[in-house]
Image (tube, rainbow, N blue to C red):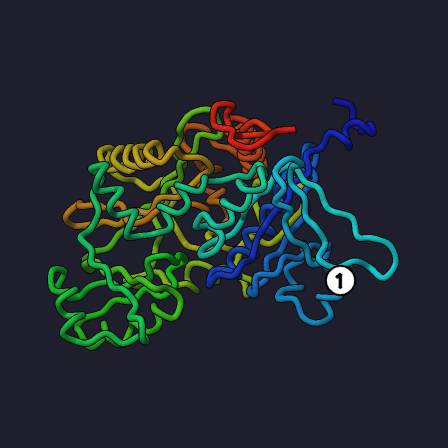
Amino acid sequence: MSQNKTSNDVINKKKIAVFFGGRTPEHDVSVITGLQVLDAIDQERFEAFPVYIAPNGAWYVGDILRDRKNYLLNAEGLKNVAEVTLDVKADRGGVLLPKKSPFFGTAKPIEFDVAIPACHGLFSEDGTLQGLFELANVPYTGMRIKASSLLMDKVTSKYLLQALDIPVLPFAVIKRPNDGYFIAEDELAGILKPLGFPCIIKPAHLGSSIGVAKVNNIDEAIACLPAVFEYDDTAIAEPFVENLVEYNVAVSKVLGRVMTSAIERPKTNDELLDFKQKYMSGGDNKGGAKLSGSKFGDQSSEGMLSLTRDINPDISYELEQNIRSWAGIMFDAIDGTGAPRIDFIGNSQSGEIWMNEVNPCPGSFGFFLWEAAKEEPVLFTDFLSHMIDEAIAQNISQSLPYDPVPNDARLLRRG
């Protein structure tokens, strides 16, 4: 290919809107993931721009959104961005409409070809944002509505995995009361009795280890629930696993067939990984190494890159096969797309292992797991390109006619 780009090369570039932030407790992690995607995307094939979703739900575009130091937007920052909304008219591709017009002239709509949702948690990773893109007929990367909503609900995920004969821990469901955060001791004791103590209590719809607590008795259980119920209407309880060991693996078919990534084994001296350990540890006060796999810049990499881990640890053949097989079974069952990360927990002494939860859109897109994959390593830049190609193919395969009402079901006059 000639190094001298023609006007056609520029015209033929797909325009990619990278959505991140969001009205979610995982807003900040999402910003980091979004910036990593913008840095790593193949600039020879695509023209990418940021669409930032603020904690209040407002959508913004602007070049200052490419720089981490500008977050969160202050009054001065807001002067340098434009608020937009998505046009849901389904016959014109992706279009962002300015919410305000300038003093002179009319603000132009911003057209794009593919959306990359780089959002984590509520009102984004859980199928809500995906549903909006489906409504607007916009190609988007990652998991579809069904998979996103199922897998972001830890309770529903448990039932799904049980039906697939994939081992999961016993669990109990605790619903937030209609009139506050307090649950009577007798009621909570009855819910937790089958599990015993100690047990783990965590939000049913959040990730990044937010709100996770180990409780040793009923008093501690009562005390920890308000922190969970502040962000989630449902808590899930599980037995505490002694000799805890964790394994994570990603799964995808963007390379043409269902494949699993490298397996990682997080290392920690604590019984649980808390939020800051996952996302803020590292070799410097900025919390991370340079972003590997990117051809275009050196945006500092945080998220899961800063977590101390073993990649492709020395584990038994049977354990590795179970992890990879169960990940593939789950992925097939929910018509998987994108590249979810599946988290397992086990007892290192007994050898027992359980599928713990599935992350439809993992932090940093789990790119380091694909770069270290045993079967076919792939750089983040290339993996993003494959995800974009999959998004376009998915949109085409699910397209409907302009008038989706079949002839024999039409009750109203057509022009």
Residue at 34 percent of width and 64 percent of height: 233
Residue indicated by mark 1: 80
Q: Nearer the viewer, residue 137 or 409?
A: 409
Image x and y of residue 323, in percent: 28, 38
Secondary structure of the residue carrying tag 1 is loop
Observer-nearest of 268 and 228: 228
Image quadrant holding the N terminus, namely top right
**Quarter where residue 185 is shown:** bottom left
Residue 15 appears at what percent x and percent y? Answer: 68, 38
Q: Residue at x 44, y 35 (%)?
A: 337
- The quarter of the rendered structure image containing the C terminus is top right
Measured along the vertical axis of the image, is residue 315 above or below residue 171? Answer: above
**Whether residue 121 is situated above or below residue 292 in the rendered picture:** below
The amino acid beneath tag 1 is Asn
Please state the horizontal and vertical placement of residue 35, each as a whole percent of the image. Answer: 60, 52
329 horizontally vs 199: left or right: right
